[in-house]
Amino acid sequence: MPKISLDAERARQQLAAQTQHLNDSISNLSQLDSRHQSAERNEIFSADGVRLYHYPPTTRSRTQTPLLICYALVNRPWVLDLSPERSFIRRLLDEGIPVYLIDWGYPSRSDRFLQLEDYLEDYLDRCVDRVLQHSAGEKLNLAGICQGGVLSLCYTALHPDKVRNLITLVTPVDSAQPSFRLGRLTAHIDLELAGAAYGNLPGPLLNEIYQALKPMRLGLEKRLRAGKELSGDSERALNYLLMERWLNDCPDLASAALQEFVQLFFRDNALLKPEGFELAGETLRMQALTQPLLNIFGLSDHLVPPETASALKQITGSGDYTELTVKAGHIGTLTGRKALEQVPTAIAQWLRQRDF
């Protein structure tokens, strides 16, 4: 058995550094106001637990067509407005884009019976109609994020007359890609049994599933890095705290809708079927989508790998398809410093060129 050689001086230095990080962290935390401060917004519609928000402009509008953001049912959309310095929404507003946002809320126990059709043809469709009424427009631009991107693709196929331009961000399209580990993992989960046991699938259980995809990086490594994050400047410490709070703000998922989503888009890989798939009483084919389409994804995304997202190019019928890649992971594509300098500006420029 090899002998273990310890460098006492190096150990003392590392211990001193960690102690200093701890002391700096305590000092930072005692001075921080870590409450989430949302950008100014007005609730203009609600149905059950769903809320629709309008963000007043911060500068002169440079597009006539409003942008509706459809976030995923998983996690909460306030990550798009984490802080004044790290806000995807504020950057869009500063670019002169009229912004609306759907907050899906927290499902109640009775929501376990909601179907995808309820989300698409009831909640999402009523939100779209309210945006059109509020903006006095005939069509809107629709931006779907992650699971919300899949919902947006389906909604646009159902109601092409209401969507002028379509944007998908970090959206899973081709679930058959070997790198799409989330799809492979869900293939072995009995969601029907989980629904019978829990009703709605618990948010904390979902968090465990996500962490299982990268257990070392999202577990031990992140805990070891916490001291360094919290001992830095106050802005860095605040954003770290807000991100951790958001990561643990994971709502339950309506059981029936989740089962349907996983079966269709993960197990059956429905978006890639040229013959289409049945949803909300219609046969939906992605080849029927003719709207201009901007597809944005991260090159380091472990939840939705680039090859899973880029497959959209193969299946859409749009003659105006644009792809934007970001050197970031899943959440970093929306909240990272470099991404915030790149993505909202690119979206605004793309929309302005198609605002007719």
Image (cartoon, helix red, strand yellow):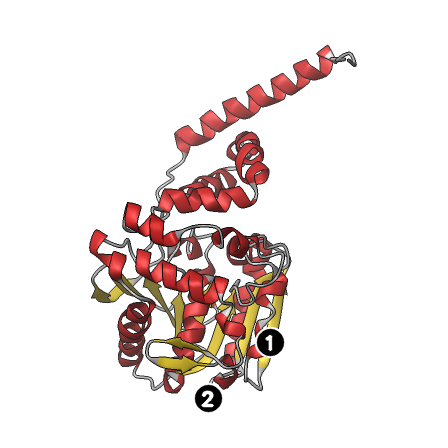
* Amino acid of disc 1: Lys
Please provide percent x and percent y for residue 183: 52, 57
Give the left or right position of residue 337, taking residue 126 as reference.
right
- Under circle 2, the secondary element is loop
Q: Please tell me whether mark 1 or mark 2 is closer to you in this view.
A: 1
- Disc 2 marks which residue? 356
Q: Quadrant of residue 175?
A: bottom right
- State the CA–CA distance, disc 1 to disc 2: 23 Å
Please provide percent x and percent y for residue 212: 52, 42
Residue visible at 45% across and 56% down in the picture: 87
Q: Residues within 10 Å of mark 1 (few under 14, many from 20)?
A: some
Residue visible at 55% across and 80% down in the picture: 316
Residue 156 visible in the picture: yes
Q: Nearer the viewer, residue 131 or 60?
A: 131
- Disc 1 marks which residue? 313
Q: Quadrant of residue 126?
A: bottom left
Residue visible at 53% across and 67% down in the picture: 173
Give the left or right position of residue 13, taking residue 23 as reference.
right
Q: Is residue 225 above or below residue 69?
A: above
- Under circle 1, the secondary element is helix
Q: Residues within 10 Å of mark 2 (few under 14, many from 20)?
A: few
* Amino acid of disc 2: Phe
Q: Quadrant of the N terminus?
A: top right
User: Which comes before the other along the chain, label 1 or label 2?
Assistant: 1
Please provide percent x and percent y for residue 354: 51, 84
Q: Nearer the viewer, residue 20 or 119?
A: 119
